[in-house]
Image (cartoon, grey):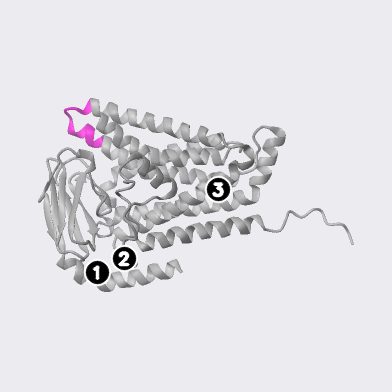
Amino acid sequence: MLGALIIVFREVIEAGLIVGIVMAATRGVVGRGRWVTVGVVGGVLGASIVAVFAGAISDAFQGSGQELFNASVLGIAVLMLMWHNAWMARHGREIADEMRRVGTAVSEGAKPLTALAIVVGLAVLREGSEVVLFLYGILASGTSASAALLGGVLGIVAGAAFTALTYFGLLAIPNRHIFSVTSWLIALLGAGMAAQAVHFLNSAGLVVALDKTVWDTSWLLSENTILGRMLHALIGYTERPTQMQLLVYILTLIAMYLLMRFARYSPPKRLPAAAE
Amino acid sequence: MRTLLILLSLATAVVLAPAELRAQDVTITIKNHRFTPSEVKVPANKRIQLTVVNDDPTPEEFESREMKVEKVIPGKSKGVVRIGPLAPGRYPFFGEFNEATAKGVVIAE
């Protein structure tokens, strides 16, 4: 039972971290609960569908279908995170000001919520499909199923609790800073996802350039530990990154930074021009 | 820039892969949550293509931190895992869904 709990918990916290950050990043935006719920429910449904078709996906593209699927999912998520950050760089301050003034939710921000709902959905989809397959395996194998299944369910509950912890932890950040903190968290999240996508493309045999390992810190912090797993999800910590992974990680961060800068320094909103 | 790199590596993969991969094909079978063979010898510093055949009705996750592999193999199906180039040494792998019995090691030499 404990084994099942830990396996499921490990998968759930990765998605949980992302959901927690997204919830904090959209603090004060009307309707975000609905969007995040849509993302989670969509992700769970998607995960079940992916699990059912796992065989077909795995067999596709000469046995590399799963890697290509994961790489695509991560790629889309990275683009959505970029979109969100650019949007937030432009409107974050207004929302923060508004929150300070009114002290309640504001109706700005219908746009990035679609992006973040997709990010949440994809995160749940990716991690969830493994949980579904694992739980299905337990069910199918009979014997000690109920205890293991209980462990699996407890793992999900623990993961949800962990998500709540992430969210309330981030809420402790003062209003003034929350958007810049979450923007950077999202930038790191995106860079980590991009590097992970590179790994999947490498496993699929598509990106094999620059595949020398840059460092090996498995002795210091193994990705197998809960902390390693969390940092992997959060900032893309990898115990043995390749040169290409490192390069893409840095490029993604730079791209995020430039995007946020450009969005911020776009021409200020035009006031009604005085007549000549 | 990235697109260019990807295209370049794609071209490299297309040119290099067929000859190299065919020569280094290894198959591992999962049965009753155990790997056969559980010890696989491969040449060091080469790209290896591992075909993991899952004969069990239940899914398994073929995983190795050392080889940077994490792949779900559904029941009664197979998956292809690309590893290497590996420095000489021992690279343990395991089935995450049945860690107690599903264990093995790749030896690069």
Image quadrant where one finds the C terminus of chain A: bottom right
Residue A183, labelled with which disc? 3
B101 sits left or right of A103 in the view: left
Cα separation, mark 1 vs mark 2, equals 10 Å
Of the two numbered discs 3 and 1 in the rendering, the one whose residue sits closer to the viewer: 3
Residue A53, labelled with which disc? none
State the SS at label 3.
helix
What amino acid is found at the position of numbered circle 3 in the picture? Answer: Ser
State the SS at label 1.
helix
Magenta highlight range: A136-146
Give the residue at mark 1.
B17
Residue A178 position by quadrant:
top right
Residue A134 position by quadrant:
top left
CB atoms at circles 1 and 2 under 8 Å apart? yes
Instruction: Look at the picture and state if A150 lies above or below A224.
Output: above
What amino acid is found at the position of numbered circle 1 in the picture? Answer: Ala
Cα separation, mark 2 vs mark 3, equals 32 Å
Query: Is residue A138 in the magenta section?
Result: yes
Q: Magenta part mainly helix, strand or loop?
A: helix
Q: Are the residues under marks 1 and 2 on the same chain?
A: no
Total numbered labels = 3
Q: In the image, residue A110 lies at what x, y percent?
A: 60, 43
Query: Is residue A195 in the magenta section?
Result: no
Q: Which of the two discs, 2 and 3, labels the residue nearer the N terminus?
A: 3
Residue A208, labelled with which disc? 2
Residue occupying the point 52% across, 60% down? A255
Question: Could one spot residue A48 in this view of the protein?
Answer: no
- Count residues near mark 3 (Cα–Cα under 10 Å), then give few for <14, some for 14-19, many for 20+: many
CB atoms at circles 2 and 3 under 8 Å apart? no
Q: Nearer the viewer, residue A99 or A55?
A: A99
What amino acid is found at the position of numbered circle 2 in the picture? Answer: Val
Q: In the image, residue A116 lies at what x, y percent?
A: 51, 45
